[in-house]
Amino acid sequence: MTHRQPADTVQPAPDRRAFLGASGALMLSFALPASAWAAGRQATMAPAHALNAWVRIGRDDTVTVICGSAEMGQGVLTAIPMLLAEELDADWARVKVEQAPADPAYNNPMFGMQATGGSTTVRGHWEPLRQAGAAARAMLVAAAAERWKVDATQCRTEAGVVIGPGRRRARYGELAEAAARQPVPTRVTLKDSKDFRILGQPKKRLDTPAKLDGSAKYGIDAQVSGMLVAVMARAPMPGAKVRTLDDSAAKAVPGVRQVISIPHGVAVLADGYWTARKGRDALKIDWDQGDSAALSTAKVEQMLGDAARAGAPSVAKAAGDLAAGRAGAARTLEADYSAPYLAHACMEPMNCTARVQGDEVEIWAGTQSQGPAQGILGSVAQVAPAKVKVHTMMLGGGFGRRFAPDFAIDATLLSKLSGKPVKLIYTREDDMAAGYYRPAAAARFTGALDGSGKLVALSADVASPSIMAASGFMKIPENGVDAFAVEGIADMPYDIPNLRLAYARQEPGPQVWFWRSVGHSQNIFFMEGFIDELAVAAGRDPYEFRRSLLGQQPRYRGVLEAAAQKAGWGSPLPAGVFRGIAVGQSFGSYVAEVAEVSVAADGTPRVHRVVAAVDCGQVVNPAIVERQIEGGIVYGLSAALHGKLEIEAGRVTTGNFHQYPVLRMNEMPKVEVHILASREKPGGIGEPGTPPIAPAVVNAIAAATGQRLRSLPIDPARLRKT
């Protein structure tokens, strides 16, 4: 007879109530303190062959680069080693990479904390990692010169070898121990890009073999001895609370061990995932939804649309005299645009494994914010941040979602309260229905054209929730403008003499968060759709109309011209196929895309080909750039064709991928990526491919049908031929 420990419902005793009260403030708003030195630091720094925090060299000449950024498919486990290996003059065939511990030594220079997002990894580490490689190279040269009793200027390096006078040669591996004792140079000279032999090359990704043979470990793969698996019934909206709970049926499920209430919901802890899920599904919960109980998709759309039409009060950018520009116009055009809440829809659902023992916390998670996790989880578990150890696992998709702390907070709370290691897994439906979303948004545009068809005045009023306010670590400036809410519009490139671009904050209720390309994802759709409308109203070709407004923007104009030329803009297409074009800048990179689209009799659009031109400054790995632009197009096209979260009676009703489809293989267009040569510093590349695709497709649909779609996702019913 199998002995089964009886299930128990954990009711917070007074001390637990105090604990939950103290940590509950972290559920929706949290600070990001500087992370303390992590326990794993000595393991990284102790080897005799460590030349600095970023690199160590083995006697077998293996060069191991330590990467502080999270790998979520964007290629940082290859790009970071390439930066360092170039200046080190390493033999690329001997370069390996390891994930860094949570440690300020590996802070993202653009964030001031160890975190991955905003397409910042290469931008932030472009010089620091090259300097680290150059410093290590100088130390190796100094060690060789000391051995040979020659001046260091008589030595040079080449592919993992120091070469001295008389053709003497010493491998990095045999010099590393002595090099580690050399003083670290305070100044180094970096290579000119014309001398690069690793950077700019399409090197194979270092993480691919582990992903192919199954040895790569994602957060969901974590296994800890004695752990329980948790599945939660999450609150349907921020602020919702449990009014009544009947957990008797859950406790009766064999294998269920505990039922625990925490601020984000009610968790069932069990011996395995399916048991925990079955127990969770057996819970009977009556939620007090408060003011959100009547929220619906229609009410969100009305709230945002009304605010945009009323005129936004917070001015993000103004120039010239808008009233005078409109008064002298030959034609004025007005249009309302909108975009819905979107989920991140990561292929790997949110998860975290946590073990709280005494005054120590250890987590295994695919997280974009290792550094912040130390401070946040230290507060949650009431331990010092230095006592929080973070194992950064591979991320099965991030897109900004895994920058949020909720799944790590919940797992840590459950381990603390249960006294066991806990692996928390959000179901797909739970993450979709009670997660973090790209904000819904609405925009009212008014444009004025003079008699020659020149755009002389433009106003844009944008209404949306505030990501800055939701983040917990940013403050909206005194002018009231959330920078994320207006990016892509406030920084639009067009030469327009009279402007007013403004923002109205509206908060319907759902939690909002950073989504791939953040505000650019909807705002470049708004902006580029309306610019196309203005081109048509002016009787101008949409490409030439944009080009005429970019006289002061050579990088915008460069990608626009390249995309048009590579796509054969103006040349004949097969019958029923039409082109649309759009351009945008985000995260320091410039991308133009041309989409070739047909529309079937039932209104279904088909994207046949996308031509993208990108100027991302100096390129680390062109193969990664191409794949990231392709991936961004897939992500943006999925949203344009299918993406929308539906809300009814205060609950998100969109569940799994049958209700929130991603692009299918038979929908995938042919994609061409053309990278423009540049000597500018690198821009980001993980996100800039996403914003131009929706407007390029919608602009092509307008050319094909005469129907201007101003809201997403694309509704085939509006395009159906009667």
Image (cartoon, grey):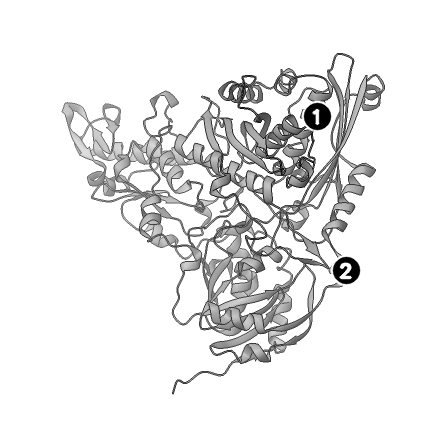
Q: What element carries label 2?
A: helix
- Say which residue label 2 marks: 291
Q: Quadrant of residue 289?
A: bottom right
Element marked by disc 1 = helix
Figure check: 245 above or below 306:
below
Q: Nearer the viewer, residue 381 or 151?
A: 381
Task: Tell me if 635 is positioned left or right of 452 in this view.
Answer: left
Q: Which residue is drawn at 56% across and 75% down?
A: 259
The quadrant in which the C terminus is found is: top right
Instruction: Tell me, for residue 577, which label it has, or none.
Output: none
Nearer-N-terminus badge (1/2): 2
- Amino acid type at circle 1 is Glu
Q: Residue at x 47, y 31 (%)?
A: 671
Q: Residue 533 carries which label?
A: 1
**Residue 20 as seen in the image, left or right of residue 338:** left
> Do we see residue 358 in this rendering?
no
In the image, what residue occupies the spot 54% across and 56% down? 375
Farthest-out residue, bottom = 1
Residue 596 higher or lower than 426, as above or below: above
Alpha carbon separation for disc pair 1 and 2:
39 Å
Q: Where is residue 599 in the image (x, y as percent from the top left)?
A: 60, 33
The vertical placement of 348 against 416, above or below, is above
1 or 2: mark nearer the eye:
1
| Residue at the (75%, 61%) spot, across then down | 293
Mark 1 crowdedness (10 Å alpha carbons): few <14, some 14-19, many ≥20 = many
Return the residue nearer the eye: 232 or 31. Answer: 232
